[in-house]
Amino acid sequence: METNKKHSSKLIVKSKTENLSLIRDFISSKASDAGILIEEIENIMLAVDEACTNIIKHAYHSGPGGNIIVKVEYDSADFKITIEDYGNSFNPDEVPDPDLRQYHKDKKVGGLGMYLMKTLMDDVKYVSVPGKYNRVILSKKINVSQN
């Protein structure tokens, strides 16, 4: 009988948009190792991309000197990404779910990060200790019976 082995990997990058591709490659590689289907991997990468873009823009105000720590943990049932930064914090409960019809009608761009993360992932948690760190935890169940 196979044991449910935990795998763990970490990537640390500076808060520059150029590093988003490194993060995407890291997530894609680890999700592939976990046996996640390509369509799901693309959704996970988009959610992580949104989280990291928010960190760069809002936590670090586009300053390139901050660290973004991306940790991936998975076993045969769960795939979890923890993203940490040391920038400004915010309260995700203050971000209302968008009215997508109005959003489209107004031809808005951006502002859907939290909505996308919640839609694409099974679970999204945000922990903030102001003045210390911010942590976003994105979780996805791995389909055990993929035919």
Image (cartoon, rainbow, N blue to C red):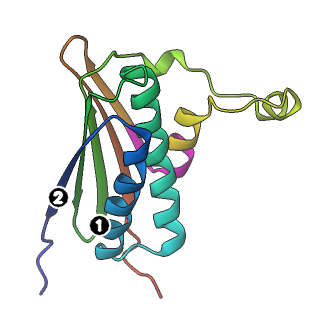
Secondary structure under the numbered disc 2 in the rendered image: strand
Q: Quadrant of residue 28?
A: bottom left
- Residue at (85, 26) in percent of width and height: 106
The kind of residue tagged 1 is: Lys
Q: Residue furthest top?
A: 131
Query: Is there CB contact under 8 Å for labels 1 and 2?
Result: yes
Q: Which residues are magenta?
A: 118-124
Query: Is 140 above or below relative to 86?
Result: below
Secondary structure under the numbered disc 1 in the rendered image: helix
Horizontal placement of 96 versus 21: left or right? right
Q: Any mark on residue 9, and which?
A: 2
Residue count near mark 1 (Cα–Cα under 10 Å), binned few <14, some 14–19, many ≥20: some
In this rendered view, identify the residue nearer to me: 13 or 86: 13
Task: Find residue 72 and report its horizontal and vertical position in percent.
Answer: 24, 55
Determine if the magenta segment contains residue 54: no
Q: Quadrant of residue 109?
A: top right
Task: Find residue 34 and report its horizontal and vertical position in percent.
Answer: 30, 72
Disc 1 or 2, which lies upstream in sequence?
2
Query: Is 112 above or below relative to 38?
Result: above
Determine if the magenta segment contains residue 121: yes
Q: Any mark on residue 41, and which?
A: none
Residue count near mark 2 (Cα–Cα under 10 Å), binned few <14, some 14–19, many ≥20: few
The kind of residue tagged 2 is: Ser
Q: Any mark on residue 30, and which?
A: 1
